Image (cartoon, rainbow, N blue to C red):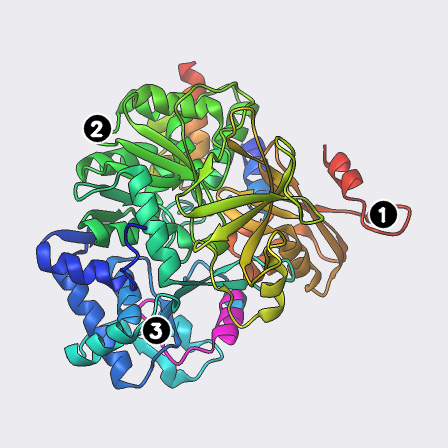
Amino acid sequence: MANARIKNVLHYLRNIVKTNPEKTAFSDGAVSYCFAEVFDKANRIGSFLAGHGIYKKPVVVFMRKSPDEVNAFFGVISGGCFYVPIDEEMPKDRIQLILNNVRSPLVICDEHTLPVAMGFDIPKDSVMLYGEITKTEPDTMALDEIYERSLDIDPIYIVFTSGSTGIPKGVAACHRSVIDYIEELSETLSFNENTVFGNQTPLYFDACLKELYPTLKFGATTYLIPKTLFSQPVALLEYLNKHKINTVCWVVSALTMISAFGTFEVLKPEYLHTVAFGSEVFPIKQFRIWKNVLPNASFTNLYGPTEGTGMCCYYHVNRDFEDNEPIPIGRPFNNCEILLLTEDGKLAENGCEGEICIRGTAVTLGYYNDFERTSKAFVQNPLNTAYPEIIYKTGDMGKLNSRGELVFVSRRDYQIKHMGHRIELGEIEVSANMIDAVKMAACIYDKAKGKIVLFYVGDCDEKTLTIALKERLPRYMIPNRILRLEEMPLTANGKLNRVKLAESYK
Amino acid sequence: MEKLLAILNELHSDVDFENEQNLIDDGILDSMDIISLITEISDEYDVTITAKDIIPANFNSAEALYELIKRLEDEE
């Protein structure tokens, strides 16, 4: 494999700072840092950790989305630790659950988040300002030693995803997984030193790996696009053109926001030549509008769960599709294999459905501080009875189409993809059931309209329930419709009748 | 106006849409909300909201949004 000798993602940063120190690395349009500045800040944070004996520990980064937050990530890695990004957008209850799980010796904040952080049930002396930490003088010798001693199986981050029990799961990923992902993704999407990324996804998900690490690898530039621009399509395109952004890896809803309302009749992206999308189905009608405006651009559908380190499959969209035909998720990256397994652990017959299971270094380390849930999804490859070999069971059902391309079919459980976010409907139900006035709650997803619908039986009105849910759930998990029922429809053996619920909604 | 308020309330039942003046600037409505809002409005009213209309000034309050719909209806 091409870059087997790189064992630490900091290799990219240490390398680029020698060849291209003055080039802009990360910017949000207001604050910008060149590679030398990123390296300096990261070294200061790493030296702070080293000086305080914080090593091989999770370090929470609780900052507003900014180039400084990116510096903090690399700083945590420089100190031989792994970063745990949390964000103001997360509800406080959820943040507390995450803090309870990771028990981090240090929470790095900025001026905005510090007062919020002080409100959590954590040791107050573990909360520190980024601006204070970065005053630490760099200790190059200590950092070099940490770098030399690091192994590629050491974790670099933990990101949290929805869990059906109401407790979020922290997916931990190591250097090896991220390096292999970045190398293969870069090759597939032809990133290079002239790439200018326009980042859309939040920094507290694995989705931002696509921009952060290739930026270091090639000496490219990433613009962290302000979130409010995604509600103003014309201003968004103006921003892309102003900063000469040529590469975007966005969720489908962000692309649709532009194409669906005739933005291209006002202006067109002038520099954009690489468009990647994922996490949900791209409506063919919208795709055609994009393809029409950018006939020479490459369009790539990406697929992968957080547990498979970002994305693990790709499909270059190079033919037209029927209106109701899904764009395939294609094929796995080099050095990654997708097994389609039947329920009894055998390979699905050609063209038949099977559960999408991932094999290779893309498989992450597991759920942090949670061996029980890890062992359910990260399992021994049933096709191998000779030695230990862990595969990740995605819970997604897939099949090969007549061209041999992998196609996503459905979920095995109640996990959904809603506006690019991965959501367990069970977590919404658990959160609703935790509210005293609610006797019973059940959630369905109206796929056609893209709406989460919550039914409940209880003594509070819809508005009270919404407010209570907002304290527990991230915004994107708040049901779009909340409907109060006299009683829940049940099946003959007393289970919740979801089919009847779905029918009653229509 | 009542029809519009009904659409808005269905979107976020806990927001005081009659008085709120900074729906966009304060991040009460995000891009997902805008997409579904525009879809609902074009179903309910006979208007087409296009990209140049999707600016904070038109979406910051229910009133502003209603003005936009009326303006577009007159243009049709």
Label 2: element kind: loop
Q: Provide the residue designation for mark 3.
A: A81
- Asked where in the image residue A469 lies, by quadrant, the reply is bottom right
Q: Are marks 3 and 2 in contact (CB under 8 Å)?
A: no
Residue A356 vertical position relative to residue A160 in the rendered view, above or below: above
Instruction: Check if mark 3 and mark 2 are on a common chain.
Output: yes
Quick check: A370 left or right of A337?
right
Q: How many marks?
A: 3
In terms of depth relative to the viewer, which is nearer, A104 or A229? A104
Q: Are marks 3 and 1 in contact (CB under 8 Å)?
A: no
Quick check: B43 left or right of A413?
left
- The type of residue carrying mark 2 is Glu
Question: Measured from the top left, where is residue A176 in percent x and y?
Answer: 37, 60
Q: Provide the residue designation for mark 2.
A: A270
Question: Measured from the top left, where is residue A349 in percent x and y?
Answer: 65, 35
Which region shows up in magenta?
A94-112
How far apart are the two marked residues, 2 and 1, measured between alpha carbons?
56 Å
- Look at the image and tell me whether residue B15 can be seen: no
